[in-house]
Image (tube, grey):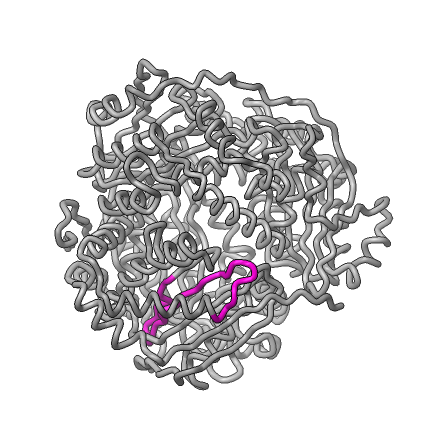
Amino acid sequence: MMVTTQAQGFEEAFSTTFDTCVLDNGLTLIVHENRTSPQVALNLWYRVGSKDEGPGQTGFAHLFEHLMFGGSRNLPGSFLNHLIEAGATDLNGTTSHDRTNYYATVPTAALDFVLFAESDRMGCFIDTVSQATLDLQRNVVLNEKRQTESVPYGGIHERQLRATYPQGHPYAHTVLGAEEDLLNARLEDVHAWFRRYYTPSNAVLTLAGDIDMATAKAKVELYFGWIASGPPLSRPAIQVPPIVPGTREVLEDRVAHGCVRLIWNIPPYGNAHHTRLGLLADLLANGLSSRLHQRLVVQRPLAVETSADISSGMLASQFIVTAIARPEVSLADLEQAIQDEIGLLVTQGIAVDDLQRVKMAQWAGFLNQHETMAAIAELFSSSQVLLGRPDGFHQVLAQRGSATAESIRATALQWLNEQCYTLWVVPFTCNVAERQGMALRPVPAIRRDAWSAPSLEVHRKRLNNGLQVLLNPRAGLPVVNLLLRVDAGAAVEPAARAGLARLTRRLMLEGGAGARDGEALTAAFQQIGASISLGGNQDCSWIRLRTLRSNLAEAVDLLGDLLLHPRLPEAVFERIRASMLDELAQEATSAPALVQRLAPGLLYPEGHPYARPAFNQCTQASLQAVRVAEVQDFYQRYIGPERTSLVVTGDVSLAEVLDCIQPRFAQWHPCRSPQRPIPCEFSPRPGLFVVDRPGAVQATLFAGSLIQIALAEFAPFAVLNEILGNGFGSRLNMRLREENAWTYGVGSLLSDGIGPKLWGVQATVDDARTSDAMLEIRQIYRDVLAQRPFTAQEVEKSRESMLLGLAGMTDCLDRLSGSIEHLLKYRLPDDYWQGYCQQLADLHVDEVQHLARQIVQPEQLTWIVVGDLQRIGAALNALDWGPMGRITDLGESLYPSHY
């Protein structure tokens, strides 16, 4: 079946095809054929979520999602590891109130294997669930719950659900559930849940990509057809309960700023009122031109940031408005200002141009979100489960297209009424101390030799002023992606002005350009369905622009204004600097963010251009020292065409691109600022540094060092990093999470500079296991060099999964642009990726071990621990790793401003 959607008044259409059938056992199969790349996206939805949990079983659907990754009868061990070794990407599972889904994108050569794997855990998972498995995954889930709820504003969600849904409503508790219920979960509960809900008749399977219905149906019948259908199920009905007018609560939390949140219960997803309110939410708070941002952030200013969105559900949804208050602002004043703006929008009505702008932005957003096969598979599965048919999304798009200013106003009057819940978050600053069917066939083999190197089709043109234009054409969606990379990042700033590059980027966008101020510039991009963002790192700044093909010329005109004629006004500069100072205060309340903020200052030598805090890349002192004239000077010195490359990907030719670019950018004059080399010299700076966070129930750990990786070492390093700490099946993650359940996960950290890289691992652990986890991490590092060197089997598995996964490296425009940007960053030839793949394919364990001996330094690690020292201090002292450095100023002193 062909489905074509075209938003009213817009040129572009979204066309896609699908076929669907239902197996004899009730499994719904949806297939979308697309032969663009040799991959298939698998998306499996079970119609079960936290809404289906009975009394005393809250959190059970999410717990079961974790259990399902523990392996099955024919594939014991980690399900994630099996699929990673098969080259899977976009691999995970999630749980919501309404459903549980599992997804992966795999090379076509591994499709039989992944279908077998999914069918094995649907049909045979129950064989592998033991009390030990339940206990292990329960601890992992409890760590996730504590980690999620302990972050700033982390306690909001549970409180608002209890207040806005009556007791007994399916949505009256969080997906993570209550700790007491999780602790009381029994093995027989797991078995009963599996038999009731994880059945073919309760599942929807979508395959999208290099597959057709005939092939797919034959394979799915082979692997799933033997499984019994499962029992008939009763499902909750739509319930949109009223909120008692005047319902209010105050929550104290360890946050830098107060917060106001307003919530209304509204109809479920798919209802026309829901769709109209989605447009209203964007009018209120999406982008610089939105009403709340302009009134409460820019003009008054009362808030650090504002947002309005919809939490969607099958039974009911919620319209949520949130504002983070500026210091010293009364929450009562902020709340009243929000209510006033909503009232004005409803009573005065919506301007036709504003509505058209938001419609265009949402339509372009829909096109952009559904570029990959993984996204298409998700679209069909979600539409089938939530709306009753694979093309149900068409109904929502039609509702959006037909919405008028008056219909939105009428909907707002009906639903955004006095039945509202208000939550204030107030800063708290005090310190405290059986088997079905027949046996399956043998596990299908994966064609490990089926990998192919990504091939880039790069067309180049350098303009007279030095601007380099690179194009990789890609037919498909009617969109064009532009990535503009400027070789000017934080490394060129004076240390005493750290944050200058980021300030410049923000001021360019928010200050406006040419004849437009920041609000008008943002509105102009939205009006043509374009989205723009600015960012950067140590070495470069970038602009990402995505536009509908039909509006490419208009988008390039706006981009040209932004680059050639930025306004850089002082009033906006002061507001942005105040906002960045507020962000620093919020950053300090997040332990993982604080760890990464401190690490560069502890590891890089004093005076090194990479010695900048992560995230905001500034300190309070450096930010307060910057003046608007210095921003204007930074723009003049460093933002120029000879330092810039423009990477274009999408359904467009080089001639079309140049027709747009050359007239607009010919007048962009070179800045002629010299390129400064990045120093490569450094020496280890081992030590243990701690930050006291009274009342924290978990500790966040970091262990790392600086490394220098040569081009020829990229492949062995990627494998080494994956085996040691980066992959789900890494030695560190398997030991700390899967074997000991001390953490929700261990992740590798790797900075992306062209110079020395900051490399390490980070984890948030039970505070009672802080020192145990540190000892385990150090021992695993030691074992790599002595008792347990890397094995040929580990290297083979890692390199094969990487090679198979490279099929997805160019499956969407963003990834395609990123592949080309990598060539620019390291000055690599266009055929680099073919050579890299061959190097990976030929990689021997000795090469990986040789590199390990150079960069794995267990005795030279820099350690950072953030936690409650009253609870963990004695254990840290008992490690006897030398004197502990206490950091009490949030790292300001690590980044002196005098050099």
Q: Is residue 152 above or below residue 750?
A: below
Q: Is residue 551 above or below residue 221?
A: above
Foreground: 442 or 356?
Answer: 356
Residue 892 appearing in the image: yes
At x 29%, y 69%, the residue is: 269
The quadrant in which the N terminus is found is: bottom left
Percent position (x, y) of residue 90? 42, 49
Magenta stretch in the rendered image = 308-332
Q: Is residue 476 above or below residue 768?
A: above
Q: Is residue 545 above or below residue 467?
A: below
At x 33%, y 36%, the residue is: 513
Percent position (x, y) of residue 850? 67, 27
Residue 274 shown left or right of residue 173 in the figure: left
Residue 801 drawn in magenta: no
Q: How many marks?
A: 0
Residue 506 shown left or right of residue 892 in the figure: left
